[in-house]
Amino acid sequence: MTSFVDALPLDRRPLMIAITGPNGAGKTSLYRAYFQDLDLPYVNADDLARELDAAPYEAAALAAQARTALVDDRESFIFETVFSDPAGEKLAFLRDAVTRDYTVVLLFIGLADADQSEARVAQRVATGGHDVPTEKLTARFPRTLENLRRALRELPYVVMYDNSDTTRPFEPVAMFVDGSRVSVGERVPTWARALVKPQQQLPARGRNPQ
């Protein structure tokens, strides 16, 4: 599963891994299965909310503070986010880390549609997990894809996975380096087809699209 990430030419700079995707995509599951053994600090607002009995917005603010402190200390770390903020704050944070000489890797886990996101959250709630209102799920889903589209152009490393089929969890879709698609999986799901095009070359970071 991690073969795309293993192929990244990482160096001695501090590493930031952002695990992103719609609610219910499996971000925490991906971290626990494949990245927990890296033994890096892990920032997750849901964990903070549970541990501190904090409201969602309070936990999100605490997570943002933790991320900023880690960057200020030049620590490598992993964090997760739905990546649905309409203002682009998370993407701006990642871009800023690049300018501060971080190796930034964005991992995006996709689902088929907002209905599947709702169904996955319902499954999580049934096993004691946290809920998210349906209206938020519906509003967030397209924003995650739009922020992913922007990230492909603006970040050095983006790796996309599909988790819509439980028989093929975290299936690699594509990897982009500086806007160029350098690897593609055996299957490109419908949600990713507009982003992963044959022989795709996106405008390089720092250049304005023509």
Image (cartoon, rainbow, N blue to C red):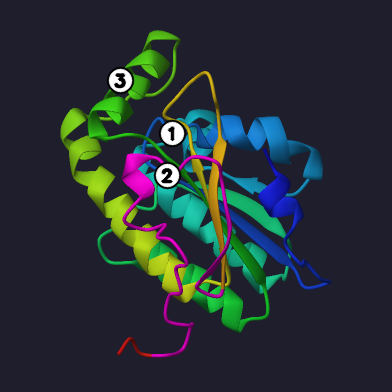
What's the residue at 33%, 51% (across, down)? 144
> Which residue has dot 3 on it?
119
* Circles 2 and 1 in contact, beta carbons < 8 Å: yes
Q: CA distance from mark 3 to mark 1?
A: 10 Å
What's the residue at 38%, 46% (across, down)? 58
> Which residue has dot 1 on it?
25
* Three-letter amino acid code at the position of disc 3: Ala
Which numbered circle lies on residue 88? none
Bounds of the magenta span? 178-207
The local secondary structure at tag 1 comes to loop
Q: Position of residue 13 (x, y in %)?
A: 77, 73
Q: Position of residue 99 (x, y in %)?
A: 58, 83
Residue 76 visible in the shown view: yes
Q: Compare residues 148 and 56 and report the one nearer the observer.
A: 148
Q: Is residue 118 toward the left or the right of residue 103 in the image?
A: left
Q: Compare residues 157 and 128 and report the one nearer the observer.
A: 157
